[in-house]
Amino acid sequence: MFLLTVLIFVAMVGAATAVGMKLYIRPKEAMERVVGVVGPADVQGEHPSLAFHEIIKRLGNFVPQSPKDVTVMQRRLIRAGIRKEGALKALYGAKVATGLIFPILVLTLMTGVSTDSGNRIAVGLAAAAVGFFGPNEYVRRLAGRRQHQIARGLPNALDLLVVCVESGLGLDQAILQVSKELEHAHPEISEEFGFVNLELKAGKRRVEALRNLAERTGVDDLKKLVAVLIQADRFGTGVAQSLRAHADFMRVQARQVAEEKAAKLGVKLIFPIFFCILPSLFLVTVGPVAMKIVRELVPMMNNL
């Protein structure tokens, strides 16, 4: 029995090793890629995932696109951090694919359920609507999450901007330095400041680059910062002094928001206390007394 177990284990290890060598470890292809020889993967064609992406993009061409809707969705994709060239077509293709797949799956699951045809059609249409508009909601949530991350990293970025400007750097160099410093702590706002620096290097005016930053992110606090910087640049006031005043304002505003949330906490705790804590407390305090009454008082009343 022990020998049979050992043989089975050796066979399984050998099979797993052979599969791994075949699928994941390909030294010949690695050597050919290093020396520049075309491998069999290049001869056979592109990766299946790339082919799938191409199919999704082609499906997106069948969706009628109004200019207003395209502008809104393109802005939403940018705010979600998706800036690839075919992202909009991929989004529309995903809408078509999910709009077709969801009804098929739902109707397949309903094959064993006895319902009339009208209900099936209604459920199929609802599933198609969910599948078609689901990618829009997914992108909207991604954009909201990214905007929240940018708003969280903005106070640190503003403090670093103040330090850099007060140490003698210009605003452009300060933006570049903040982008480098916050690359790992707050990658979202670091990426946006990096785009501002690239636009400045491309020849755009500072005011235009800052306005593009506010429009690209859609964060209210960042729009206020951009307005302060534009006004300081237009009227010739000190950038360091303006940033310091705005940093103090944002700090006071953050404190007020925290105090507001703390004041609302008591009202929000009413429902958890009423539905979760009070029943258990009532059960612990009144439960033993009720059990004692049922065990002792009820038989005495029955005997009477």
Image (cartoon, rainbow, N blue to C red):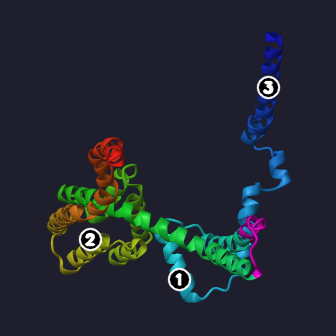
For label 2, the crowd category at 10 Å Cα-Cα, with few meaning under 14, some 14 to 19 and many 20 or more, is many
Label 1: how many residues lie within 10 Å, few (<14), some (14-19) or many (20+)?
few
**Residue drawn at point x = 18 percent, y = 80 percent:** 235
Task: Of the two numbered discs 3 and 1 on the same chain, state the one appearing first in sequence.
Answer: 3
Q: Residue furthest front?
A: 304
Foreground: 25 or 37? 25
Structural crowding at the residue carrying mark 3, measured as other residues with C-alpha within 10 Å and reported as few (<14), some (14–19) or many (≥20): few
Q: Position of residue 16 (x, y in %)?
A: 77, 30
From the viewer's side, name the closer residue of 182 and 91: 91
- Secondary structure at badge 1 equals helix
In three-dimensional space, the C-alpha distance between marks 2 and 3, rounded to whole angstroms, equals: 62 Å
Q: Is residue 93 above or below residue 2?
A: below
Q: Quadrant of residue 236?
A: bottom left
What is the three-letter code of the residue carrying label 2? Leu
Q: Is residue 216 above or below residue 174?
A: below
Question: Dividing the picture into quarters, in which one does residue 94 lie?
Answer: bottom right
Label for residue 71? 1
Position in image of residue 60 (x %, y %): 69, 76
- Residue type (three-letter) at the residue carrying disc 1: Thr
Q: CA distance from mark 3 to mark 1?
A: 56 Å
Asked if residue 8 lies in the magenta stretch, the reply is no
Q: Which residue is mark 2?
A: 225
Q: Magenta residues, as a range?
A: 104-117
- Give how far apart the Cα atoms at labels 2 and 1 are: 25 Å
Q: Please name the residue that numbered disc 3 is placed on.
A: 12
Which of the two discs, 2 and 3, labels the residue nearer the N terminus?
3
